[in-house]
Image (cartoon, rainbow, N blue to C red):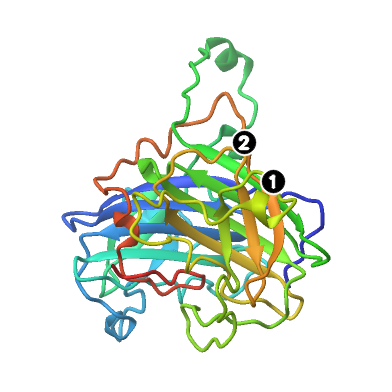
Amino acid sequence: LFCYAQGTTMRSRVYTAKLRPIGNSGVDGNVAVFASNDETGVIGYVGYAHGLQRNLNLEMCGTANNAQGCGVHIHSGTSCFDKATQGGHYFLAPVRSDPWRQNRYITNGKGIAKFSGIVSIGTNNVVGKPFLVHNKNGNRVACGELLPVFPDDLPPPPPPPPSSQQQQQQQPPIRARTIVYDVETLPLSNSGVVGGASILTNAFSVSDLVCFFGKANGLEINQRSVRSAIGGGRDCRATDGCGVHIHSGFACTSVGSQGGHFYDQNRMKADPWVVTGYESTDQEGNAYFIDCVSTGETSFDQRLLIVHSSDGTRVSCGTMEQRTDENALSAISAATTTMTSGSFFSMVAVVASTSLILLLQ
């Protein structure tokens, strides 16, 4: 059961990793991990990998002796050096059963996988943990160590001894090319829906790529979207049903001031926000959501995040506020890709425990 207090901004710790080939696998990619401030240790991850076997579906993944086929997981180790330092799947008490077993990907005709998931792992401290990608047979083929986008996402280090402290030299701050926003959404009309999210722009050094992770409560209970990656949903059929979108306006006061979906209509072939939102709600009306969207836009200051109900009504709205830190690390800017604008979302949808039903262009 996930609870959310009205008037509290969800400020997730944000980590990224450049996924590099293990051995001669040829598989690489990028991943972003959002670690929520929930006591339950809920994290969201979203990323991609290429160089995988083409046209994989879930029925083709794994073997009788290895159930890790097509898996993507945070591991418990301290580095990507070898299997021993990578460790096994990462989760802590009170979580007892492995929450990573169902987190897998499928690939398109070019061997590209986009993956995402929302997992309760019992902790929100993932700094330095290896993020692993497995191939069809369960072998480890790519790995990256999660680094914080902001230094305050690091746990406090133990104080150094006086002798070491005296010898320390102050390093100049590295200014990030990425920007992190936080948003608190409040009810529209009398909906009672509140929420919050953390939003990463210039993700993976793609200037118009925005990734976000958040939650809302006060929604309709026990909803399952028709766009659910796990299938079986019959709700949210209306336009914008169960949607979560960045809007073009700057004020939540009216539909006019909120504007429509925020994207460059001259650069994008279609509205990239059509299929973004939450997949389901629980018995208390709570929902988590995670996604990445290529928008054609590069500036998001003071834009709005809007949550929709199952019938498409706008029920919660908030302004994106830039997270400030003069010592922001350039973790994401180092993770360069050759992907062009919009290409990240040309891929086939990946099956995970979150809302990523994508259009195949």
User: The N terminus lies in which quarter of the figure?
Assistant: bottom right
Is residue 62 something one can see in this rendering?
yes
Name which residue lies at 56% across and 56% down.
260
Q: Label 1 near label 2: C-beta < 8 Å?
A: no
> SS at mark 1?
loop
Number of residues whose C-alpha sits closer than 10 Å to that of mark 2, classed few (under 14), some (14–19) or many (20 or more): some
Residue at far left of view: 24
Residue drawn at the location 49% of the way across and 60% of the way down = 291
Judging by the rendered image, the residue that carries numbered circle 2 is 323
Instruction: Say whether residue 270 is left or right of residue 108.
Output: right
Q: CA distance from mark 2 to mark 1?
A: 19 Å
**24 or 151: nearer the eye?**
151
Residue in the image at 43% along x and 41% along y = 202
**Image: 276 above or below 302:** below
Give x and y (percent) for residue 231.
48, 85
Vertical relation: 266 (above or below) 188: above
Disc nearest the viewer among 2 and 1: 1
Q: Earlier in the sequence, mark 2 or mark 1?
A: 1
Q: Is residue 95 left or right of residue 118?
A: right
Amino acid type assigned to the residue bearing label 1 in the image: Ala
- How crowded pointer 1 is (Cα within 10 Å; few <14, some 14-19, many 20+) is rated as some
Q: Residue furthest front?
A: 256
Disc assigned to residue 251: 1
Where does residue 106 sit, x and y in percent of width and height? 32, 73
- Please, what secondary structure does the residue beneath circle 2 have? loop
> Does 134 appear above or below 13?
below
- For residue 76, the mark is none
Depth check: 215 or 236 in front? 236
Q: Which x, y percent locates residue 207?
A: 38, 41
- Establish if 203 lies above or below 71: above
Quarter of image, res 66: bottom left
Q: Amino acid at mark 2?
A: Arg
